[in-house]
Amino acid sequence: MKISRECIHCLARQAVEIAEEATSDVTMQEEIIKRSLKELGEMDFNETAPEIAFRMHQHAKKITGNNDPYKRLKEQYNEIAKEIYERITEEKWLDKAEDRFDMACRLAIAGNIIDFSVGLKLEHSDIVKSVEDSIKHDIFGTGTTALREAVGQSKNIMYIADNSGEIIFDKFLLENLPLDKVTYVVKGGPIVNDATMHDAISTGVVNLVKVIDNGHSAQGTILKDCSSTFRHEFDKADLIISKGQANFETLSDIKDKTIFYLLRAKCSSVAAAIGCNRMDYVLTSY
Amino acid sequence: MKISRECIHCLARQAVEIAEEATSDVTMQEEIIKRSLKELGEMDFNETAPEIAFRMHQHAKKITGNNDPYKRLKEQYNEIAKEIYERITEEKWLDKAEDRFDMACRLAIAGNIIDFSVGLKLEHSDIVKSVEDSIKHDIFGTGTTALREAVGQSKNIMYIADNSGEIIFDKFLLENLPLDKVTYVVKGGPIVNDATMHDAISTGVVNLVKVIDNGHSAQGTILKDCSSTFRHEFDKADLIISKGQANFETLSDIKDKTIFYLLRAKCSSVAAAIGCNRMDYVLTSY
């Protein structure tokens, strides 16, 4: 999905947010904002938004020397997600569900509300609401039955994670997949609140499933920039479960692969590309 | 008022709007967007937003050769405003008002809803609503009585206009000022929907009052870039009536002059600088 006209002011907003998250030094903030805006002015309209955002983040990292500005927030949201995960487990939502796999998908999608790039002011209550609404909300797209069938027919499943916090909700779905066939993928390095190996370890995802990183620290999956190890695994997979907007933005032009996208459509550009309404719960393949 | 952090993504949004209004040629649009974003990346954080926006618009004008992209829209909004003006006149709102001057101020402020830079999707009904609400809405600031007193004490009044369409609503207030003491100011050239001499003529404002232009085609009043003729008149004035956000943004650091600002606070940065709520009806001086 190429950058849309609407992405432009969203990226400009992110330039300010990146600067303010990376440092409290006003001079450095201003330098980050200006370099990011110039970077935005250098873009190629055939690029995806995560490619441009990556270069903006690189400026922030170079200028501040802070490689992981969202570290504290990531830990905080892992904690919040863990609390909610434990409540759902104690209350046996999956055991009580009419369709266990469907419920697991819904919760994995619900967790995608934890995204710091889309300009939402996220509160603890928003995550709880996303989870509670996920049970009753229509799922836009091919739906959970299609994914269940694809899983049944697959030998190598790649599950591409999105954000910290969110990865705890992925555990619900992972526990309902044939885990010996699944490779779970996190980012090769920190960017915004995207999950890295550190999160996979601290949340116990590594105890469930084989986890690898993609060798790159951009949002989404920019194949050309990922490690050869990752690309080998990607090529091998006959089913990709892709979480979140940025993975959709960077993978949606790939047409020769079975990819299921699970996400909350938090911005209007992604919603328009999918053909759904903003904030819809999406599970679809093309 | 210096550019705020929130102005940045608003200016990036305007970069896209400027491009799309100036031409339907996608390649040219992309060039305008990229040059505008680079221009934004070159900004000085001590500048005002209208100074930066001006340079962005210059790129659009140079690239397209279109000096007045909003011409059609300006004519359209002059027509809409004329219709509403005539209805208010026929229904004798001012004659029926308890306080004629207060009513005239409210209508002049109401007209400031006609602004194409602030990201509002403006409909005919929004203008009618702004006008109807202006009657009952609290006025934020020093209020109409303070302006009436200042008018009574002044010998040279400068009334700095803002947008086309809006200038028709200014007629209500102009008709309640000592017109022999008033100089009405429009822009020296087209920018967005700001009123120029063309609008002052087509709406009949020139038949009411002495009209001059400021010799520059930026939004607001960037004194250093205005003509010496304008600056001479500005220096001479003992009361400035300033309409709209951009005039506030570019004049609000001037402290040795009696300036009354009349506007709808359409963006959160201007509202924050004034200390009012977004969309408030403002009449204030400092």
Image (cartoon, coloured by chain):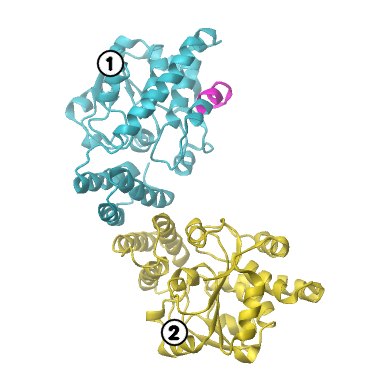
Chain colours: A cyan, B yellow
Image check: B177 left or right of B269? right
**Residue shown at 47%/29% (left/top)?**
A124
Image check: B187 left or right of A3? right
Disc 1 chain ID: A
The residue indicated by pointer 1 is A206
Vertical relation: B137 (above or below) A87:
below
Question: Where residue A260 sits in the image (x, y, percent)?
Answer: 40, 25
Q: Which of B284 and A216 is in front in this view?
A: B284
**Residue shown at 25%/24% (left/top)?**
A197
Vertical relation: B239 (above or below) A73:
below
User: What distance separates the C-alpha of mark 1 from that of mark 2?
Assistant: 68 Å
Q: Does the magenta-highlighted stretch encompass residue A133?
A: yes
Question: Where residue B33 sits in the image (x, y, percent)?
Answer: 37, 60
Disc 2 chain ID: B
Residue farthest along the top direction in this orientation: A95
Q: How crowded is mark 1: few (under 14 residues within 10 Å), some or many (20 or more)?
A: some
Q: Which amino acid does label 1 sit on?
A: Val
- Mark 1, secondary structure of its residue: helix
Please report the bounds of the magenta region as a residue range: A130-141
Q: Which of B30 and A194 is in front in this view?
A: A194
Q: In which quarter of the image is residue B101?
A: bottom right
Q: How crowded is mark 2: few (under 14 residues within 10 Å), some or many (20 or more)?
A: some
- The number of numbered badges drawn on the structure is 2
- Mark 2, secondary structure of its residue: loop
Q: Examine the rendering and report whether any part of residue A242 can be seen.
A: no
Q: Nearer the viewer, residue A193 or B98?
A: B98
Question: Where residue A13 sits in the image (x, y, percent)?
Answer: 39, 50
Residues beneath discs 1 and 2 located on the same chain: no
The residue indicated by pointer 2 is B215
Q: Quadrant of the N terminus of chain B?
A: bottom left
Q: In which quarter of the image is residue A242?
A: top left
